[in-house]
Structure formats: C-alpha cells, structure tokens
Image (cartoon, grey):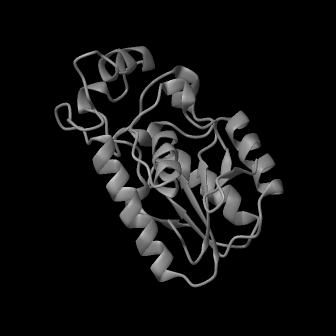
Amino acid sequence: MILQNHFYVMRHGESINNVLGIESCRLETQIRYALTDEGKEQVNQTAQAAPKFDAIYSSPFRRTIETAQIMAARHNLEPDIEFLLHEFKLPSELDEQPYEIAEAIIHAPDTDLNREPIGDSETFDAMHERLKNTLLALDTKHENQTILLVTHGSPVEAFIQIMKNQNTGFGPFEDLPKNAELIHLNSLNLIA
C-alpha cells in the first residue's frame, strides 16, 4: 500500500492488565487498566527516539490514551481519539479473563477466529478491514504529514500485514509487538 503521509504505529506502554495477565478488550471494562509506572517510562523512552509528529490518534482505551498523551506532550499536541483503532474485540466472556484461558479458546483446533467469530467477537478479517479503511481515511484527511497511531498489539499486527498487502491472520500471542514499540509503517522499520 502506498500512502501520501508518513504513518507510525505504536502499541501502548505496559498496563495493569498486562502485568496481571488479564484480557481487556471491551470499552466497558478497560477503564480499570491504566499504564503502570514501567509503562509510562517505556513510553517516555520511545518519545525521546520518535520523530516529530503532526497528528496523533489514539484508540479510546485508557492505556492507549495515556500513551498518546505522553507522546503528544513532547510535540505540544493534543491526541485525537479514533474509535476504530480499538483493541481486537474478543468474545465478551473472555474479557477480564486470564490470558491462558483466552489463548486456549482462541487457538483451539476447531476455532478459526481469523474468519469465524466466536459469540459476539469480531474476526481478524473484520479487524483487518476496519483498520485498512481507517488508515486510508486518515491518509486522505492529511497531506504530507507524519502521523502516529496509538493502538494495541493485535491491531499493530494487522497494520503490518496491511502494509505488506497480506492477511495471514493471527500469529501466536508471543509474536505480538512489545509494549511501547514504534514502527514506521511506510518502511516497516522498528524505531524504538
């Protein structure tokens, strides 16, 4: 995909749910999971290595908003909340469950969450399409700017696949981007 703007994508810093090993994929429950002190430090370190941004967009989750605010403070910007950058929507019964329970269900042999939803979940295909359309809309909205998208691990995976013109679905959970990683989408280079 060719973009007229420079896009960077960043996974939020370490959050309380990461430390507890708890899924947090719903807007209704995510408010409890702020960044940890370590997460704030991770984001501050990334901010020091980051280029200058003209605009910053954040998922509506607390941990991404806090990450975006730290990044934005460096550039005297106010981050915009973009609902479509939200976390991958797992089935509601997996929200606030231990990672191991979610992983066992998502990676069960008879499950294909890439193409078939479980209950009220979305599929990887649906998330991929949602993020591709969001990226194209933001690219049209801006002209020759450098833009940061602050989101979550699974959406970062999807953005990377979008830039490679691929849709290979979910990888193993251990392949998720690290907290506070900053990736230049146009070149797929890891910055910090």
Viewer-side residue, 157 vs 25: 157
Residue 154 vertical placement versus 108 (above, below): below
Q: Position of residue 58 (x, y in %)?
A: 52, 59
Residue 26, quarter of picture: top left
Residue 7 vertical placement versus 40 (above, below): below
Extreme residue in the front direction: 165
Viewer-side residue, 173 vs 67: 173
Q: Position of residue 16 (x, y in %)?
A: 56, 31
* Side of 55 where 51 appears, left or right: right
Q: Position of residue 189 (x, y in %)?
A: 70, 52
Viewer-side residue, 111 vs 102: 111
Viewer-side residue, 128 vs 9: 128
Residue 7 vertical placement versus 151 (above, below): below
User: Residue, x 45% and y 47% (percent of image)?
Assistant: 158
Residue 165, quarter of picture: bottom left
User: Residue, x 40% and y 57% (percent of image)?
Assistant: 131
Q: Position of residue 101 (x, y in %)?
A: 36, 15
Count of numbered badges drawn on the protein: 0
User: Residue, x 62% and y 51% (percent of image)?
Assistant: 67
Extreme residue in the right direction: 48
User: Residue, x 46% and y 30% (percent of image)?
Assistant: 171
Extreme residue in the left direction: 119
* Side of 30 where 144 appears, left or right: right
